[in-house]
Image (cartoon, coloured by chain):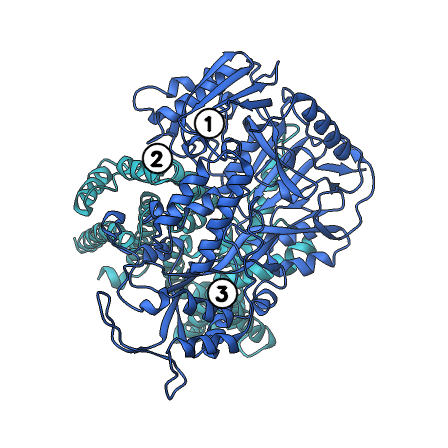
Chain colours: A blue, B cyan
Amino acid sequence: MRRKTAIALAILAALILASAGCGGSSSNNATGSGGSETGNAVEGGILRVGSINYIDSFNPFHYIESQAYNAFIMLYPQLVQYDYQNGAYVIVGDLADSWDTSKDGKDWTFHLKSGTKWSDGQPMTAEDVAWTINTTVKYASGPTAVMAPALAHVKNAEATDPTTVVIHYGAPVGNALAQLEQFFVVPKHLWEKYATGDGKGLKTYAPEQDIGSMVTGGAFTLKQYEKKGTTVFLPDPNYWGEKAHVQAVALTYYTNADSMIADMKSGQVDWVDQVPFNAVDVLKKDPSIVVQQIPGAETTNITWNSNPYKDKNRELLDPQVKQALSMCVDRDKLIEVVFNGYADTVESLPGHISLYENKDLGPLEHDCAAANATLDSLGYKKGPDGTRMVPATTGKYAQPAHPMEYRIMTPTSLDFNGDRAFEIVKEGFAEAGVKVSQWVGGDSTAAYEIETTDHCDPKTNSGYTGWDIAMWDWVGYVDPDFMLSVVTKGQWCSWSDTGWDNPDYDALYEKQGTTVDENERASIVGQMEQMIYDNWVYTQLVEEQYIDAHTTAWDGMDPHLNAYAKMYWTRPFKVG
Amino acid sequence: MKGFDYVGKRMLFAALTVFVAITLNFVLFRTLSGDAVSALRCRQCTQAFKDYQREQLGLDKSKWEQYQLYLEDLAHGNLGKSLRSEQPVTHELWPPLKNTVVMVALGTFFSIVFGVLVGVVCAWRRGTWADKGGLWSGLAFYSMPPQWLGLLMVLFVAGWFGLPTAGIKDPTLGILGDASWWDVLVDRFRHMILPALTLGLVLYGEYALVVRSAMLETLGEDYVLTARAKGLSNWRTVRTHGLRNALLPIVTLVALSLGFIIGGSITIEYVFSYPGIGLEVVEAIDQRDYPILQGAFLLLTLSVIGANLLADLLYFKLDPRVAG
């Protein structure tokens, strides 16, 4: 059970305000370089942000792009949000001042801030929260399916008074607050007309088509929207939290990162939310630009087809073989050559960003001699051309003797040089006597189709054939639930890109989902990470750094808060 | 009657081509792996959401049923709805189309003016430094990939002249106050300069080379020699006897190019984040948004077929030999 009191939040808010409002450099634990950040905070100014991600919707029930999620954070209230304090993510209140849970962990009571208003001046109450929750649950299998995962196991919600809402769960939920952090409240008085009949109106309503009648309740309001151009946000005077320092935020979408960097260098952009690796060194040399680096959420991996029912190249189901091949990959070289040095090694699937990262895993050593010894001992002898041979096997999944020659599938949509990364892996595998060739799988959709294979069906264990190895990436999250889910059988033909089928693991996944005690949940999650690691479902290679840059005319940007908090947008200020 | 036959046949051929293109438009995109729903790779895209989407978008129907519906809708002038935004395709394509047409018109205007001018001067002053300069500049720009030339513009030209490299408007224009129509116009024009110039330079190279070649051929004709023998000035000989007769292949080339320019601007729009039809197509491919792709490719196909038809008709008008 967790409880945060209003007093603690008030103290916290005061500390945050003090740190943001006093000017000077921000203390966000990011590694910074470039120009010096000195001077006082000046209220006002238009913050021009460049991004390679665009906003596709302002409807929280219907969106795809990650930048849309950022827009929701700016525009809609959440019960809770993340902050980054003393080197760690912590849940803090947004619309909720405090909260408590029942002993069985099934009822969560949120005490809301009083006197809050929507952008049209209407009062924002617990009824809005309860209505949004109940409506999302009601249409969870259709129109509201996008936001429904944030309310997993929720039965219903009730507003017991204008500032108190109680959420009733069907089962205790281990990550209730982390899930609710991804839940946005919409104004009942505007949206209830769409929640009729089959509820399809909830999904098709596009608030951006009539900005004048759009009702929001976040730190900002929407002033202008161009899907493939600039979107402008203005601070909302009704907002109850940390007030924005800026007069406006103008977020411009770039399809070409080189143009974005050129515009930043020429002073037409103040802040770039994601700097490509090849541009970091150039920006660092510019004294008028500050580059900030933090550990990122994106990890790259070797994805092993771990479908236990596959009929070919079954030697690659053996964790010892996969480990041996992984030990021949020079990850330091990958970091230097492919990521220009802006990446770190990683072992666990959820990555360093996860609150429950199992830090006891590995590390995977680069020791190809030991790897060769392992493969020798397993009976995979090298042939005359140096390629190892797999002896014939018998039984249900009998396969003839064959050389260890495989294809590695790489999608074309990687945000790093996949060809170069493949070459480094190929070199490593060659040292182990394994020959690989690159198989370009097309864009992410086409590559994903290759992995899951036609006629994929978990009920008949079909799918996940026709390929053996891929190289791809995952973007993790602070709470590890989603990342842990992608290797469950429940995600076959959906999010699973390995075809792994391990009932013991799936049972642990269910257990962690209903374990409220944080320490106990952390222990289960740790076990699950160990299982993924020991079975070499993935070989985690590196974790990309997340790098942003801003001009010295601005300060207060904290890259840790991107997509996690309203403060990401309210704290930046102009330097006087 | 011969003229009517010619025009009629051309129109019929164009109509048949349109039908084939419409069918290919349908088949082509469905041979790609995956569909609009399998293309959804977002954390919140649950299986329940995907199943619901497939049903709502009609992707659970057979391909034949989808084709019939597609033809039926087209016959009613309905291009369908975007699978992603669920807005009508015409609504989605109209703003980018407007942006592209203006930018392409500006680039084409530039290329025609300078291409014809340089081509004429090169032919007129054959063998001189002016000819060599025009020839080499034409060859250089014609052989450059548009996206590479665009990147050079971003890296070396934009900074010098303080020109924007992305979008169609200044992000700060009119945010805190109203911008006058003049400010908006100037701003739009500034954002159009680099993409239009990139397109214009690539086309300029092509036009200059073709005009030079056509002019050289014409200037070698006997009637030009006769004109000179009659004592006409050099310029008048070039203008009235050379250029006018060389116009035939030039007009055809420009008409044909117009059809392809819309499609050819895809890479340029991508480099300059220019929200035109090209950018829309790239993203629709990535998202397997069939109706948008079908709408955009129908538009591109129609523009190519229309331009071909225009070229045929112009030939008919300009060259009496065609009319017989």
Looking at the image, which is closer to me, A207 or A388? A388
Residue B276: percent from left, percent from top: 46, 46
Label 3 resides on the chain identified as B
- Residues under labels 1 and 3: Cα distance? 40 Å
Apparent side of residue A478 relative to residue A272 in the rendered image (left or right): left
Which residue is most to the bottom?
A384
Q: Mark 3 points at which residue?
A: B145
Looking at the image, which is closer to me, B39 or B171? B39
Contact, CB < 8 Å: mark 1 with mark 3? no
For mark 3, does the 10 Å Cα neighbourhood hold few (<14), some (14 to 19), or many (20 or more) residues? few
**SS at badge 1:** helix
Q: Nearer the viewer, mark 3 or mark 2?
A: 2
Quadrant position of residue A136 = top left
Residue A495: percent from left, percent from top: 38, 48
Q: Which residue is drawn at 50% across and 58% down?
A: A300
Q: Do labels 1 and 3 share a chain?
A: no
| Amino acid residing under circle 1 | Pro
Please say if A291 is above or below A412: above
Q: Which of marks 1 and 2 is in front?
A: 1
Q: Residue at x 46, y 27 (%)?
A: A207
- Residues under labels 1 and 2: Cα distance? 16 Å
**SS at badge 3:** loop
Q: Name the residue under label 1.
A: A207
| Amino acid residing under circle 3 | Pro
Task: In the rendered structure, find residue B88 and report the number of the disc placed on it.
Answer: 2
Q: In which quarter of the image is the N terminus of chain A?
A: top right
Instruction: Tell which circle, 3 or 2, labels the residue nearer the N-terminal end.
Output: 2
- Residues under labels 3 and 2: Cα distance? 34 Å
| Amino acid residing under circle 2 | Pro
Label 1 resides on the chain identified as A
